[in-house]
Image: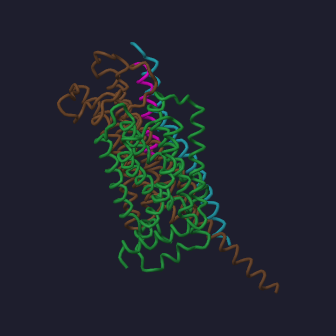
Chain colours: A green, B cyan, C brown
Amino acid sequence: MGTGRAAAILLAKELRLEFRTRELLTGTVIFVLVVIVLFSFAFDPTSADSRRYGPGLLWIAFLFAGSLMLHPSFAREQTNQTLDALRMTPVSPFAILLGKMLANFIFLAIAEAVLVPVFAVLYNVPLGGVAGRLALVLALGTLGLVITGTVFSAVSAHARMRELLLPLLLLPILAPLLIAAVEATAALFAEQPALDPTWLTFLGGFDIVFLTASWLLCDFLLEE
Amino acid sequence: MTHFRFLFAAWMVAWAVFFVYELTISSRLSRLRDEIDRLKQQLGQK
Amino acid sequence: MKRLSISVLAAALIFFAGYAALFVAPDESTMHAIQRVFYVHVALWSAMYTALTIALIANVAWLATRQMKWDWLGVSAVEVGVVSCTGGLATGVLWGKPAWGIWWTWDARLTTAFILWLLYIAYLLLRGLLEDPERRATLSAVFGIFASLDAPLVYVSNRLWRTQHPAPVMFGGDNSYLDPTMAKVLVVCIFAILPVMIFVLVDRYRLERMRHEAEELRLAMEDRTEEANRVVTRSTA
């Protein structure tokens, strides 16, 4: 079975599983909401401040949410050893990984779609003209987040203290992505909103490099 | 010499990181060597 | 005997390098004496890059060959790399305060270097939390390869962006220039620190190999004890 088709089937499975209970999604959304509200206590969100700190705050909230949400990605498989079952099917390891990455991307994207408008309202950040370009930046950043996060979720799945380990592994490696995403978002929140080509290229490059590395190393990730 | 304290501290730190690290390795090495000898003796007897 | 003579050689190299850095190297026009930290600072980072390159090779070699010795080399190289990185950061901080007036700043070079430090500490933590030796070797090798994607970023950070940290003085294009005597002293210092690093690396490798040996012996002990117990219960049954 081709990788693409296998990944699509696995993606459908992941989505079906999650939408049965929606616990991961609701948990993530509520968590990010709490983080956004808590940040407003740390500094007074007048409009000028919001433009400056807003992007950073938004991405940190997504980063935290992502690392919390990614952990169950492989941990779930361990309860009934479903990963072993998957491995025995003629599906390539990359398809398994890709299916999970896409599922995580969709979940996180849904959470972001809910939260960005809320953020805009709470912090008085006008998003009218930049919605499309913001979506692009969000997509590229989130892609990097889920690619790396899914891989490291597989790495930490067998370790002790994996709930703590995943953010510990993930956040340092995502720091360059975070910086690029924040800068690109900040460029869109500015007086003269514009897409910054440097940071966008960086984001795209990050995604491609890490996806390639995942593809090259996927066999080792899903080993016995 | 200006800022001599910092220069001295920096050189000391550079030397110290390797030296202290080497010390920790050496102590662990000798402890392990003792344990291996002990285990080998026990296995030889049993 | 061999160990002693290597230690003496290393000590001599360090002494020679230190003398060169403190007395042979010319005085720098703006920072004067404190600039001499440059020699040990750059030497430490060279040691780190070397160690991390060795680690990357070891990680790939493990995945390719499944020979335990590559895993031992990998963890040893990463640990030595973290030690060198710590030294690099510390000497940088101690240079920054007198030279810039601030202990730290979040420019591209310092930030990426700090992240690299965190990344490889995470590697060591990961290893501590994985129990099965083979799985630990494989997963940490994968993580190690991902982590090494960050190292080139540290190197180019002060070429791509304007940073508080000085721009490159070697291989940096038109604006980079290093006085020839300074360059020679720098080379001496780098060639002094590399043997020290290798010496420590080999020791750490030996430690790892010995740990493996001890673990095998312990398992053999457990098997023997199990055997003995089974014999006892059989004979009493």
Q: Quadrant of residue A181?
A: top left
Q: Which residues are magenta?
A: C80-98
Q: Quadrant of residue C24?
A: top left
Going by the picture, which residue comes out furthest to the top?
Answer: B1
Going by the picture, which residue comes out furthest to the left?
Answer: C174
Vertical position of residue A205 compared to residue C232: above or below:
above
Residue sitting nearer the eye, A51 or C121: A51
Residue C12 location in percent, x, y? Answer: 38, 34
Is A55 within the magenta?
A: no
Direction from residue A156 to residue C89 in the image, left or right:
left
Mark count: 0
Residue at x-position 34% and y-position 60%: A212
Residue at x-position 60% and y-position 49%: A30
Residue sitting nearer the eye, B5 or C21: B5
Residue A89 location in percent, x, y? Answer: 46, 80
Residue A149 shows in the view: yes
Work out which quarter of the rendered image holds the C terminus of chain C and state it. Answer: bottom right
Residue sitting nearer the eye, A47 or B23: A47
Going by the picture, which residue comes out furthest to the right?
Answer: C236
Direction from residue A83 to residue A1 in the image, left or right:
left
Residue sitting nearer the eye, C157 or C188: C157
Residue at x-position 46% and y-position 71%: A10
Going by the picture, which residue comes out furthest to the front?
Answer: A128
Residue at x-position 59% and y-position 39%: A37
Vertical position of residue A152 compared to residue B15: above or below:
below
Residue C4 location in percent, x, y? Answer: 45, 43
Is C83 within the magenta?
A: yes
Q: Quadrant of residue C102?
A: top left
Q: Identify the main secondary structure in magenta.
A: helix
